[in-house]
Image (tube, coloured by chain):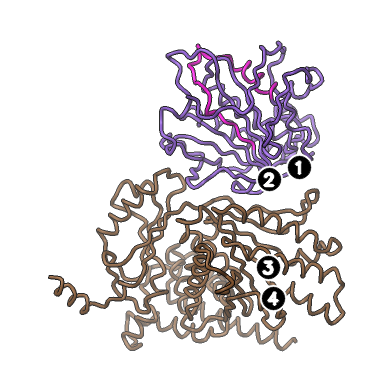
Chain colours: A brown, B purple
Amino acid sequence: MDEAAGDLKQALPSVWDSVQIHVEVHQKSSSTAKKEDIRRSVLKLLNRHNVVFGDYKWTEFDDGFLNSNVQSVSIVDTELKLKDRQPIDLSKSSLSLHIFHLNEEGPSSENLEEENEDIIAANHWVLPAAEFHGLWESLIYDTEVKSHLLDYVTTTLLFSDKNVDSNLISWNRVVLLHGPPGTGKTSLCKALAQKLTIRLSYRYRYGQFIEINSHSLFSKWFSESGKLVTKMFQKIQELIDDKDALVFVLIDEVESLTAARSAFKAGTEPSDAIRVVNAVLTQIDQIKRYPNVVILTTSNITEKIDMAFVDRADIKQYIGPPSPAAIFKIYLSCLEELMKCQIIYPRQQLLTLRELEMIGFVENNVSRLSLVLKEISRRSDGLSGRVLRKLPFLAHALYIQSPSVTMTTFLQALSLAVDKQFEERKKLADCV
Amino acid sequence: GKMAAPRIAVALAPTRAIAHPSPFLIAEAPSALDRGGGMRPQRSGLAAACPSVSVVFPGPVSRESCCRFACELLKHVLHQRHQLPLPYEQLAYFCRLQHLSFASSKKCQQVLMELEGVLQHLEVMFSLTLVPRVLILLGGNVMSPKELYELNLEGIYEGCAEESLKTASCVRKLFHALFVADVFSELKALPVMGTVVMLQGHRDCGVDWFRPKLNYKVPTRGRKLTVNLSCDGVVNVSSSPPQHVTSTWEDYVWFQAPVTLKGFRE
């Protein structure tokens, strides 16, 4: 019997034996059900539907308890681990269930000067936040950027949590994402923080996300020198002191900090600025020692960041503009949304690139529209994710303006919008 | 027995009769009260960072009274901590008459409307479930507020309306103790910020306005004041034991009001 089972195992692709399948369970905001009860019902559900093809999301249930307590049950991030879309036998996989509630409050702002409410030094969210929900899925990259970052930070937190001696093995919790503007670096930081809070909810009760406004550090508090930076980090330290909290500190466009240092060396920056920058760097060194902290930084220009900072970051990830394959996926998600809202009507089944590849890119009734989209994606090469997600809107505003259109008409408009985008770029370049 | 032993018992003789039972009137007239005497509660040794005020009522207290304590404490804190320019009742009064220049402003009406909403929903909540604890959180977020006021009702013996102490006299006693403890005068002025109310209730109480926060834990940092209320004296058979004894701890979960009360200045 065992032998037979062994043979069967060899015959079947055994990828899922080693792969952890993550199941995210979004508990309704009004639900007070116990986690154990939800876990039990979700496991029953997964037992009934035990084969899925890649990521899958349930929002309606045949079980009354789940219907009243659970918003959605999602099999997530399978594509990060399994290259090809293939059937996953849940009964044979190792399942990790993550049950979470979203915090619906928006960000609270941290004012540093008690008397002056105008200066907002930082925005502050409690994670998982409703505002960041769905962000992770909306970010599409070609390379394994997402899985690398997730694995990296997970290992980091594991090492810290297990008290690995940092004199013997050196690692830190500073992440630097760099690349051209509009590629979703800031969004990726937020999405990553949200993801980790959900994944690590067995260890940390909640996440705190602090987005430091590095421009305001300079423009307004110049005369106050580094004192206020110290004050801000004191507040962050208080958050870190709560061992149940996973604290994320985001310093956006970090080059504005570090540029000041090099300018100082060149003698063009007042000494106040350098004091602010040094205070920030010292504070980062202080807080990065704590096991429950992740410092996320982004930069639009890699060259301008000085080495003092680059050395501090352990993981430096380049985030480039999307490839035509990623552009195709981005467009697909946009069109899916427009069909859901019935702006594109009637609904058309679009094929994924993988599916197109499987039929050898042969044109027929099923594949025609998808091939048009593939061509638009090819011509969109070079546009950033931020622009791409704007184009469906521009296509509608400029060339359609009716409440409901067919897919064919919409794709024509999208194509025109892409052309216009490149024309405008050219004009701008000519002006300069 | 009682779940929470009061740190300092303020065993006051029956409070002097005050013509107007409105609590903020008491607070508005500090000199009228005897602040000396041996009755001033001390802050406990540890409590420099975390002062507490304890009040022991000489008999059972009704659920409605508990609700009033929470509502009055909320109004009082908002005014004392500079989130309302006037005590709530005065503000509501002037706002209705549109006497004050700012009172007619949208901001004032907005704040009052939101506050009234919270007060109404507190009543609903108290009618649905025992409420062992109420939190008033100022500034920051619910996990890390700037200031935290905790009303601990775990030591209350709940009685039905007829056999319980009168609400007005209990409120008076509570505010007298707060006042004598002089908990607000040393605090420095606060900027205008957001206030959130949280409270514990039974998991299955069926409230739909307050949002359950199953992962919540009371923050240990930030400035905190605890107000412990409990009952003493003869316990009638008919009055309930201290809250909680009848149910297990884990069935009481935290709920959060879905609005943030924004403070405002004139």
In front: label 2 or label 1: 2
What separation in Å lies between label 2 and label 3 (alpha carbons)? 26 Å
Image disc number at residue A288: none
* Residue type at tag 3: Asp
Residue, x 81% and y 79% (percent of image)? A263
Residue receiving disc 1: B190
Discs 1 and 3 lie in a common subunit: no
Examine the image and state in which quarter residue A202 appears. Answer: bottom left
Q: Is residue B128 visible?
A: no
* Residue A419 rendering spot, x and y as whole percentages: 57, 84
Residue receiving disc 2: B146
Label 4 marks a residue whose chain is A
Residue B119 vs residue B256, the one in the foreground:
B256
* Residue type at tag 2: Lys
Label 1 marks a residue whose chain is B
Range drawn in magenta:
B149-177
Quarter of the picture containing the N terminus of chain A is bottom left
What separation in Å lies between label 3 and label 4 (alpha carbons)? 10 Å
Image disc number at residue A285: 3
Residue receiving disc 4: A309
